[in-house]
Image: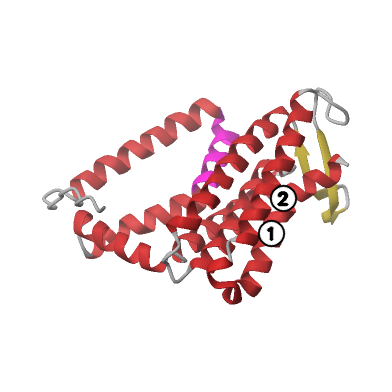
Amino acid sequence: MFDLLIVLIVGLPLVGFVVTALIGRRLDREAHWIPVGLIVLVWAISMVVAFATLTHAEPFGEAGHGTSLFTWIPAGDFQVHAAFYVDALTACLLIVVTTIGMLVHIYSIGYMSHDPGYWRFFAYLNLFMFSMLLLVTADSFLVLFGVVFLLGLGQALSIAAQSALVAEHCQEEIRIYGHDAVYGVYRLLERLGNALGPLIASLLVIFWGYQGAFVALSAFVLFCGIAFTIATRGTDWEPAPASL
């Protein structure tokens, strides 16, 4: 039973993305029911799996439990399986990711209600959730690295779907950060960080360990902050007026 539940946790958001992408335009302002309903179901299943894992129930025990779908790369002795694994750490991450994801989906019903990209946003939001849950449960580093790029894609598409809101937000950012090259570099670094940040952090941990990765990332963030502060000196910044 738990093998099926683990697969459903990862698979249901993908089903929501495909269905919403295919028929979301016809549903228009009702397009949220399928993706939001599936994420609520994913949250409920995740709570069941997390409880069983943290209480060391069978088949999880002390070490956790994995399930394999198929062999992704069969190359002699080197084989990579498309598999999921749930242990105590994964269970904690499932609680965090599914709870926050569910709340974001529910909040977005009202937040995106007047945006023309309503149905697309929820489709891409399900794709993002699929990527996050695959990232949490993946049982091999190759699958993990592949998911990182899918995660960046899902995030970028969900942001792009907020056409009207993003256009208004970008105008405010341009006013604050400046035009042309400075703003372009800012957006480029932001997107590269979203897509490649987890991959770079993973590689740093592998080669330098946790302490070395922490020092390297802290130094890089500090450098970017100083460089961006210097680049935007003289920009007229004023808080945006509050809207009622």
Q: 237 or 125: which is nearer to us?
A: 125
- The segment highlighted magenta reads 197-209
Residue shown at the point (61%, 48%) measured from the top left: 132
Amino acid at pointer 2: Val
| Among the 4 quarters of the image, the one containing residue 227 | top left
Q: How is the image coloured?
A: secondary structure
The answer to whether the residue labelled 1 contacts the one labelled 2, judged by CB atoms less than 8 Å apart, is yes
Left or right: residue 16 versus residue 8 is left
Disc 1: which residue: 14
Name, please, the residue furthest toward the bottom. 26
Residue shown at the point (84%, 40%) measured from the top left: 2
SS type, badge 2: helix
Q: Is residue 135 above or below residue 180?
A: above
Q: Quadrant of the N terminus?
A: top right
Task: Please say whether residue 44 is visible from this viewpoint.
Answer: yes
User: What is the CA distance from the residue labelled 1 to the residue labelled 2?
Assistant: 7 Å
Left or right: residue 169 versus residue 175 is right
SS type, badge 1: helix
Task: Please say whether residue 83 is visible from this viewpoint.
Answer: no
Residue shown at the point (21%, 63%) measured from the top left: 179
Disc 2: which residue: 10
